[in-house]
Amino acid sequence: MRKTQTRKSINIKDKEDLIYHQLRQSKFFQQRLPAWRPVPTLCAIIIFYTAFSLIFIAIGVVLIIFSNQIKEIEIKYNEKCKDKKNQDCQVEQEISEDMDKPIFIYYKLYGFFQNNRRFMKSKSQKQLMGKETTLDEMKSHEDCDPIYTNADMGFGENQPSADEQTPLVSNQQAIPCGIMAKAFFNDKFKDWTINEDKLTINEKNIAWDMDKDLFKNWDKSKQWIDIEDEHFIVWMRPAGLPDFRKLWGRIEERDLKKGEKLSITVKNNYDVDKFSGDKSIILSTSNVFGGDNTFLGICFVAVGGISLLLGIGFIINHFIQNKGKEKEK
């Protein structure tokens, strides 16, 4: 019986060695698979760079032309509302040119580095997805370092929770926790009027659908904010540059005409003086390419221009080589 088992094990081992040896000797392992190895000629390189440059320049010019059709109005309100911290502030602006609906409303921050590594890391994705966590768990994982509790968020004992009924407990874990959540942009824009007529702002569907699936409430009586609030979801997607804008809402009911007077009541909660920044409201139209893509268009033209210069350089080199050959003959 033992001899039979030994023979079987030897046979199995031999088969494995054989398969391994066959694999090692295969064309894939030995890098002998058929392949196309183009050898670029000077003419081919010239054609490639020229075609590449023309395509990129054409795309860039189209983007710049469409971007020039975008109409924007920026309303900087930080200086005007500086003396009204945590108070309502009236902001007025005359419409400088006709704007067709839908008109997108953004808030813009200057000098705020949302892409800072510590800022982006200081959050709990588990909390944001509506899963139960504990304070000890948060501290052990250091997900939200250094903002763990409601006291760290700066909330007192009488701070209402997201359900607007239950007060928060200062030494309990903050939901959501972290620097990113604490820095949430909390200015409020309300009572929009145009020539003293009420203007309705659509604040729904401003966040990406894929982002909304990642943000779920857990227990509003313990949360300091509604995690499913789309303004909060938009804020939690970090911007890549220190000067950035984020979507606030849309004007969909009517166009804005040149000379009309826009009035907005701003609840001035967000302090930008701490980081020597600035803030503004932006009204912008859109087209098939979205908003203002002037910078992207310039990038396309620049890359196309560099490729064209390289192509011209290769053409000059080609003529120089031909003249040299003619002289040798």
Image: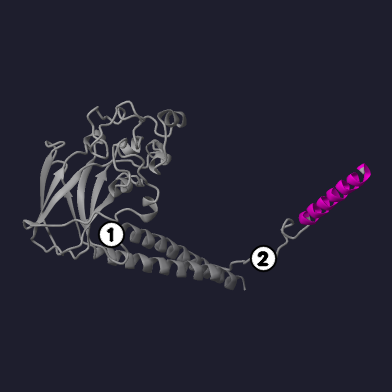
The percent position of residue 183, horizontal first and vertical second, equals 29, 38
Residue 174 circle label: none
Q: Is residue 121 above or below residue 324?
A: above
Q: Is residue 167 above or below residue 303?
A: above
Earlier sequence position, callout 1 versus callout 2: 2
Tell me which corner region of the image, top left, top right, bottom left or bottom right, holds residue 121: top left
Answer left or right for 197 relative to 39: left
Residue found at the very far left of the displayed protein? 196
Q: Are marks 1 and 2 in contact (CB under 8 Å)?
A: no
Tell me which corner region of the image, top left, top right, bottom left or bottom right, holds residue 175: top left
The percent position of residue 94, horizontal first and vertical second, equals 10, 56
Q: Residue at x 44, y 63 (%)?
A: 307
Q: Which residues are magenta?
A: 2-24
Q: Residue at x 80, y 56 (%)?
A: 22
The percent position of residue 21, horizontal first and vertical second, equals 81, 53
The image quadrant where one finds the N terminus is top right
Residue 35 circle label: 2
The percent position of residue 197, horizontal first and vertical second, equals 8, 58
Residue found at the very far top of the displayed protein? 171
Residue type, numbered disc 1:
Asp
The image quadrant where one finds the C terminus is bottom right
Q: Residue at x 86, y 46 (%)?
A: 9
Q: Which residue matches tag 1?
A: 292
Q: Nearer the viewer, residue 24 or 150?
A: 150
Residue type, numbered disc 2:
Ala
**Callout 1: SS:** loop
Whether 54 is among the magenta residues is no
